[in-house]
Image (cartoon, helix red, strand yellow):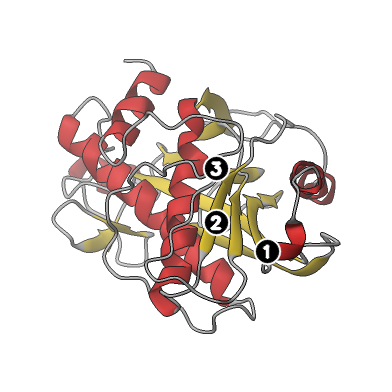
Amino acid sequence: MRLHVLLISAFALVLPMSWAGAALASSNASVASPEKPLVLVAAVGQRFTSVTQVKQTGSHLPPYRRQLVDAPDQVLNRIVLQGLDDSIAAVSPKTQRVLLSVPIPITDYGDAAVLERAAIEHVIASLRAMPRREDWGKVVVMTPAYRSMGRDGLGDRLRGLGLFYQTQCESNDVSCSWGSRPASGPQALTKEGETRPANFFVAPYSYLKCWVLDPVSLEVLEQYESLEHQKLAVSGGVMLDMRDLDNRAFIAKNIQTVVYRSVEAAVAQTELVGKISLGEVREVRDAKAQK
């Protein structure tokens, strides 16, 4: 099966796919608050990245094959926005929250600073066109973070949301053939809930940048990044087969978990709400437009 079909099937297991609109707003406060509402913005783009490590034989090129997959109906923004909403609600349930989804231009080239700045400048331009910003509290924006260098056993030049496939043997041929692994190897989570060394793994990653803006001037008050991932493997020491429905569900659930964890870690660095602790990941529900 093609990768985009597998990913759409995986995302369908954790959230409905019917959300649309260039900028959709809703009030999610369970109790009305006299304070100005926080405006929460997701702007992580419409592309999910697949990065696969491949065997390198005498080439100076990076040993990775990359594929960009279009994610329809702003599904990536939806996952990030739900995590952002949950993060604030966990510590301040009475705070009124306005949710916005802002598409950003597809930009795949340039250094990290240029790409990050282009994303936030596009969001600021979109917000500047909205009236009555003086009625808002602070604006919290999530955009993709970019990393040129590899880290934590993942590839280089990763950005935003994606999957990293470690398809090459991480130890020695004998260990890989028998499904065994030295204890010092990368630790991966299995469907059985165990953490074990893995020769091969699939790793959902969420590289996000959190910006806190003044609602009127749209000046950047704070900015932080969060780079999260989770290595996933099977107990038998082979690659997770994406054709298997249970494996797709396992990966899909961890995509959402990693994104939520990344959002939580980013927001927790701000001065907005102090320490944040998220509960169990819940299914994403459609936001309703507020006029």
Residue 169 at what x, y percent from top left? 38, 42
**Secondary structure beneath disc 2?**
strand
Residue in view at x 50 percent, y 74 percent: 33
- Residue type at mark 1: give it: Trp
Q: Say the numbered circle drawn on residue 291.
A: 3
Residue in view at x 28 percent, y 29 percent: 242
Q: How many residues crowd mark 1 within 10 Å: few (<14), some (14–19), many (20+)?
A: some
Task: Say if 142 sits above or below 56 in the image.
Answer: below
Residue in view at x 56 percent, y 60 percent: 227
Q: Is residue 263 visible?
A: yes
Q: Earlier in the sequence, mark 2 or mark 3?
A: 2
Is 125 on the left-hand or right-hand side of 58? right
Is 193 on the left-hand or right-hand side of 206? left
Is 103 on the left-hand or right-hand side of 21? right
- Residue type at mark 3: give it: Lys
Residue under label 2, please give it. Answer: 98
- Residues under numbered marks 2 and 1 in contact, where contact means CB atoms less than 8 Å apart: yes
Residue under label 1, please give it. Answer: 136
Q: Earlier in the sequence, mark 3 or mark 1?
A: 1
